[in-house]
Amino acid sequence: MASDVSHVTLDWPATVVVVGESERVEAALEALTAEHDGARVVSFKSPRAALTSLEDGGDADVIVSTKALDSGSGVDLLRHVTEAYPDLPFVLAGADVTVTDERTAIEAGATDVVRLDPADSSGDGVLRARVRRALEGSRPRERPRVADRSDAPRLLGGTSETIRRLFEASTREAVAEAVVESATKTLDNRYAAVYLLDSDGQHLRRVAAAPVDDDSEGPVRAGQGTRLWETFVTGDVHRHRGASVGQETGADGASVTLPIGEFGVLDVAVDGPDDEAVGAGEQLTNLATAATAALEQIAESQSLQRQAAELDERAGRLERRRTLVDALSTVQRAAIEAESQDELEQRVVNGLADTGQFAFVRIERVGSQRDRLEPRTWAGAERGYLDAVDLRLDESVQEPAVRAARTRSTLVVDDITTGLRDDTWREEALTRGYQSVLSVPLYRDDRLWGTLTVHATDADAFDDEVAGAFDDIASAISNGISVVERKRSLLSDTVIDLELTLTDGTDLFSRVARETGATLDFEGVLARDNSAVLFLVVTDAEPAAVERAFESAPLVDAVDHVPHGDGELYEIELESVSLVSEILSSGGTLRDLTADGDTTRLLVTLPAETDVRRFVESLEQVAPDVRLHSRTQRTRPSRRDQPFRVEFEQRLTDRQLEALRTALLSGYFEWPREHTAEEVASLLDISQPTFNRHLRVSLKKLLELLFDVDEE
């Protein structure tokens, strides 16, 4: 079927009257005169001057007014014009036009409203297109008659009930249905359909049509359905002789396709000859303009709702952040104030449970056999969960705390219902109301000590921010445990001395002494990165032979040495499963170590409340031949400097304390120096500037404490 698609063209002397002061509006419309020789723009600064010109018979084919005028507003002028000249098109335009202004103008009878974005010049082209569209059918004719205000509803595309329905609609679909009903029932057209742009910006989808046909029309993709997309893209009204897109018309029928702003198009089948189609087009233009305003109102409302939801979500994040910061502060205070590790742990779980965000909070420790987690303390709704689940440190066990301990990493389960049949722990958790869980490993002196686990009654309770906060909380707990242990060790008057022996001659130190003939003298020991660093002075042996013996031995990660008096000072980094590493991680202090070719003896000091049997059992896991030779409980001589030492160590981080001790033990403070700053930094596996900074900060804190200088 042949088609005749026509665009709005100005081939007669059309006059555009501009009212108000807006250089942008005038410039945009002056460009219209350059595009069409027959068009001219006449400007009036005041509404009174424009009305006087109309009363005197001045030419006007469309009025374009700004919102702000020197007396009254553009809407006030609109009401005067529509009352006196109801057939004269009126366009309200400007950067200060709001959605409320748009609705008010449409209800008052505006032909179109154009909201200009100050930051987007493309609106100028939209304004010109809307003015061209308003001029459709405005060929030279008699001056419009003064009409009754009752004509306004007809020019708005129907009754006031239609306008009310449009602006009370809460969805795009409701607006589309109101438009279709008005186009078919009120304006008595054969067929009408509204196509709205999908969220992907690539499809026009029919969302309302009357009469409804049985065929479900699919979306029209960009570039397809030429008339619909051309109308949508250009903003021009298209008339088509013949069938509409969605309905076949009779021989005398035509179709009109109109843009609905940036939202879609209205496609209508009109009965009758061309002149009737032109008259219907004017009414449908006003209806499409009203629909545009209604859809803009919905879009703005939805935008406000999204902004409100984002603000609520942001407020929720801020509240969670404040809660976690408070929890971290609780842990840090507990680390300073707690007198024992048990007290520290209880204060941590109670503090987290009291936030109200977590249903159940628990701490487990690695058992003495290092083959399972043992519950230590908890708070909240435990409900028998710990007795019901398997906490063995076995690859087959998938319980979150076990996995966090086994992998040495933070574990988050966002939704416990996922894989419900695969893991028995999930069922146990769900029956107790838990929906998500997070678990983080805990360390003491860089050695895995246990886990902190929290359960929530909501799924997806632990986002990246929360998980990161729990990493900080876990670090604070680990630091707190170290502080409590150091404080207890320094302040305790009563201690236990253990003499331990290895008598089979196969241990590291006996073997080195036997192979090299060396004498080994203990200088000191440090805990570092889940291992131990032992300092020994070796005499009566060739340094190269001693170094080879240590390097070839199992459980030794690295060896370094420098001259030291009559011998060599060796720094020996031991693996985490070594006997010395286990002594440190279990809370002991290594005081001495001697070895000959057959026997190694170690002197270890423990706090008085230590369970010695359990301590020795933990050592047997890494050194089955270790034996408890003697046990002595003694009262240490009173030292007036103990409080000073406690406060000093509390002021230092573990890394600063390690740097200071390593520098001392390695001979950095000797004269001449036995190790340079670069060499000590290498022993610590850090850069020289970092070592220098740790050392300067540590010494500064020591001097501040010594001379009673307040920290800033």
Image (cartoon, rainbow, N blue to C red):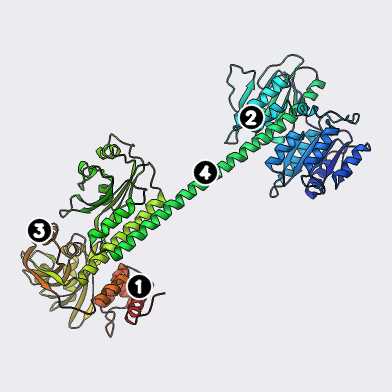
Q: The residue under label 3 is which amino acid type? A: Pro
Please tell me which of labels 3 and 2 falls first in the chain: 2
Mark 3 lies on residue: 624
Q: Tell me if residue 249 comes above or below residue 637 in the rendering.
A: above
Q: Residues within 10 Å of mark 3 (few under 14, many from 20)?
A: few
Disc number at residue 336? none
Residue 308, x across and y down, in percent: 54, 45
- What is the spatial separation of the Cα atoms under label 4 and label 3, in whole angstroms? 62 Å
Q: The residue under label 4 is which amino acid type? A: Ala
> In what quadrant of the picture does the C terminus appear?
bottom left
- What is the spatial separation of the Cα atoms under label 1 and label 2, in whole angstroms? 69 Å
Residue ID at (28%, 76%): 663
Furthest-right residue in view?
56
The residue lying toward the viewer, choosing from 445 and 476, is 476
Question: Do the residues bearing badges 1 and 3 touch, measured as CB atoms within 8 Å?
Answer: no
Disc number at residue 175? 2
Mark 1 lies on residue: 694
For label 3, the SS is: loop
Q: Tell me if residue 319 comes above or below residue 650 in the rendering.
A: above
- What is the spatial separation of the Cα atoms under label 2 and label 4, in whole angstroms? 24 Å
Please tell me which of labels 1 and 2 falls first in the chain: 2
For label 2, the SS is: helix
For label 1, the SS is: helix
For label 4, the SS is: helix
Residue 232, x across and y down, in percent: 68, 33
> In what quadrant of the picture does the N terminus appear?
top right
Residue ID at (42%, 51%): 320
Residue 353, x across and y down, in percent: 32, 50
Q: The residue under label 1 is which amino acid type? A: His
